[in-house]
Amino acid sequence: MQAQAISRYTRVTPRKARQVVELIRKKRVTDALNILAFTKKRAAGELAKILKAAVSNAGQNTRVDIDSLMIKSIQVDGGPMMQNTRRFIPRAMGRASAIHHRTSHIKVVVSDEVKK
């Protein structure tokens, strides 16, 4: 049995979110939540929320033991960039560029299946 949670348009850059994802990939859910609680990155809070949502989705099934859940897969993809049209960042030779605010699409799949 597996369950998933998807968060789209999360205001975390994909590159920084992937650093935190590498810490919790293929771990038990309880261990992953402990790791995220003590990680000093902003992406850790967002990932903890998504992971709790996936556990809650798995809890809707009465046959699932929540304590035995593992993170089967977790992926971070880039979302659309928001551009701030009022502020600019200075560039070389007197030019200016728009400030890009990156977003992420995060998908977490948890499962209670044992590895073979």
Image (spheres, rainbow, N blue to C red):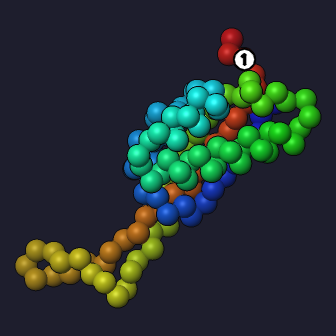
Q: Is residue 27 above or below residue 76?
A: above
Q: Residues within 10 Å of mark 1 (few under 14, many from 20)?
A: few
Quadrant containing the N terminus is: top right
Q: What is the three-letter code of the residue carrying label 1?
A: Val
Let me know if residue 52 appears in the view: yes
Residue linked to disc 1:
114
Q: Residue at x 64, y 43 (%)?
A: 51
Q: Quadrant of residue 85?
A: bottom left
Q: Position of residue 3 (x, y in %)?
A: 76, 39
Farthest-out residue, left:
93
Q: Is residue 13 above or below residue 71?
A: below
Q: Position of residue 26 (x, y in %)?
A: 57, 27
Q: Residue at x 41, y 41 (%)?
A: 19
Q: Is residue 97 above or below residue 32?
A: below
Let me know if residue 107 appears in the view: no
- Residue 7 shown left or right of residue 83 in the figure: right
- Residue 103 shown left or right of residue 88 in the figure: right
Q: Quadrant of residue 71?
A: top right
Q: Position of residue 70 (x, y in %)?
A: 67, 28
Farthest-out residue, right:
62
Farthest-out residue, top:
116
- Residue 104 shown left or right of residue 108 in the figure: left
Q: Position of residue 115 (x, y in %)?
A: 68, 16
Q: Residue at x 47, y 39 (%)?
A: 38
Q: Residue at x 43, y 57 (%)?
A: 13
Q: Nearer the viewer, residue 86 or 41?
A: 41
